[in-house]
Amino acid sequence: MERKFIVDGIEGNKASLEAEDGTILTVDLALLPAAVAEGDIVRIFIDHEQTGKKKEEIQNLLNDIFR
């Protein structure tokens, strides 16, 4: 699932993101790409492929620790 937001405004170290349904999120500007500007579209999605790889990596580290 993917959600799209438009950067509605930037004040100080905060950005207001508006979802397609009108929901407003306020996030730390540091969480967004450095070049983000008002009017930009930001997409947030779950990367299942990378999630699986990271879980496998963590499991391998745990297996190494508890041998």
Image (tube, rainbow, N blue to C red):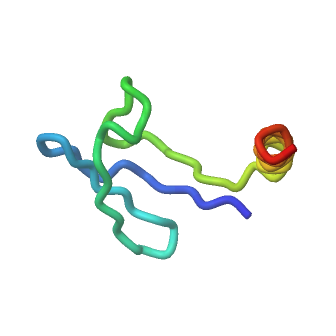
Residue at the (21%, 44%) spot, across then down: 10
Residue at the (58%, 49%) spot, across then down: 43
In the figure, is residue 7 to the left or right of 11? right
- Pick whichever, 49 or 12, lies toward us: 49
The residue at the far front in this view is 67
In the figure, is residue 54 to the left or right of 36? right
The percent position of residue 21, horizontal first and vertical second, equals 49, 75
Q: Is residue 19 above or below residue 39?
A: below
Q: Quadrant of the N terminus?
A: bottom right
The percent position of residue 28, horizontal first and vertical second, equals 29, 48
Q: Is residue 32 above or below residue 28?
A: above
- Pick whichever, 36 or 40, lies toward us: 36
The percent position of residue 34, horizontal first and vertical second, equals 37, 25
- Pick whichever, 38 or 58, lies toward us: 58
- Total labels: the figure holds 0
The percent position of residue 54, horizontal first and vertical second, equals 77, 43
The residue at the far top in this view is 35
Residue at the (35%, 65%) spot, across then down: 25
Residue at the (18%, 41%) spot, across then down: 13
In the figure, is residue 48 to the left or right of 6? right
Q: Quadrant of the C terminus?
A: top right
